[in-house]
Amino acid sequence: MGLGKTHVMQAIGNQILAERPDLRVLYTSSENFMTQLINSLRQKQVFNFKDTFRKVDVLMVDDIQFIAGKKATQEEFFHTFNALYEAKKQIVLTADSFPHEIEHLEERLRSRFGMGLVADMQPPELETRIAILKNKASGEGLELADEVAFFLAEAIQTNVRELEGALIRVSAYASLTGKPITMALVRESLKDIVKGRDKPATIERIQETVANYFKITQADLRGTKKSRLYSHPRQVAMYLCKQLTRHSYPEIGHRFGGRDHTTVLYAVDKIDKKRNDDAELAETLATLSDMLRR
């Protein structure tokens, strides 16, 4: 799923060993568990197999859902689980769904998986996605502008794997064309990936996107603070509301803290005139518009 389950599991194992290097920690995938079981049966070395998985202090199995529907593997894992549990050892499992949602999983395993601590991993939030991109780019020696990182993080919200894949694609495209990573290059290199993800632009989405982009709160956009730190993003948001939605000036003003329609009209006219002479503002508007159409 690309949510980082494997990384979290490996981090748990590393932390355990850092604090207790004397413990025996075994990490494996469910596929490897099944493969080793099959090989042990063929070679008549079942006892060696059992020693491998039952004489550890911590057993970590990744993607346990893949044993579902496999009778012999479920049978062996059931006994392995019981042996470790009765010996008061630790068991850490990952899956792509909750225990009760794994189809074709034996009920006795389902109940055992569910009796421990179940942690639900959600896709990372915008700020985390931006940080992941920045860290990845830094590790690859890439210069990634804030607006590019923000655009990628907004456009790809599904999982980390797809997000990193998009960055790799952008980097490869830049390398092949000999061009720097700009918004124009990102739009061109990812045009087929983001195609078909269009969402209707609403005032709520515009406020959220603009607030995140300028690193202020949505309350600030709707509030009364007059410094440019808040007034400029507010005017940009009002402009985008008029350009991307069918709401009237009075309706937009109402959603920005009950402002008069003349305030919205002033903001829209100001941004519209300024964007012709301000390349940075024009690029910001284009970036935000692209994100709001995704």
Image: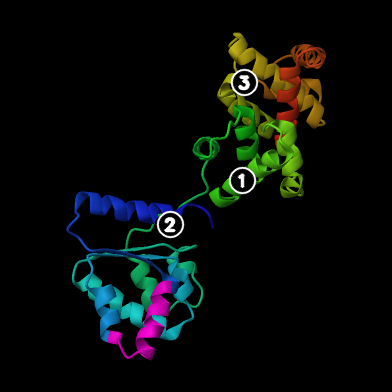
Left or right, residue 271 beside residue 229: right
Residue occupied by mark 3: 221
What percent of the width, then of the height, locates residue 234? 66, 18
Decide whether residue 45 is among the magenta residues.
Answer: yes
**Foreground label between 1 and 3:** 1
Question: In this view of the protein, which residue sits in the foreground, 110 or 67?
Answer: 67
Decide if residue 110 is in sight here.
yes
Question: In this view of the protein, which residue sits in the foreground, 145 or 256?
Answer: 145
**Callouts 2 and 1 close, C-beta under 8 Å:** no
**Foreground label between 2 and 3:** 2
Residue occupied by mark 2: 6
What percent of the width, then of the height, locates residue 43? 35, 89
Depicted 262 relative to depicted 137: above or below: above
Three-letter residue code for mark 3 = Leu
Three-letter residue code for mark 1 = Ile
> Which quadrant of the structure image shows residue 173?
top right
Three-letter residue code for mark 2 = Thr
What percent of the width, then of the height, locates residue 99? 43, 67
Decide if residue 200 is in sight here.
no
Which residue sits at x=30%, y=86%?
Answer: 46
Report, in whole angstroms, how far the alpha carbon at label 1 lies from the one at label 3: 35 Å
Left or right, residue 87 beside residue 266: left
The part of the chain drawn in magenta is 32-46
Decide whether residue 101 is among the magenta residues.
Answer: no
Left or right, residue 112 beside residue 124: left
**Callouts 1 and 3 close, C-beta under 8 Å:** no
Residue occupied by mark 1: 168
What percent of the width, then of the height, locates residue 293? 75, 38
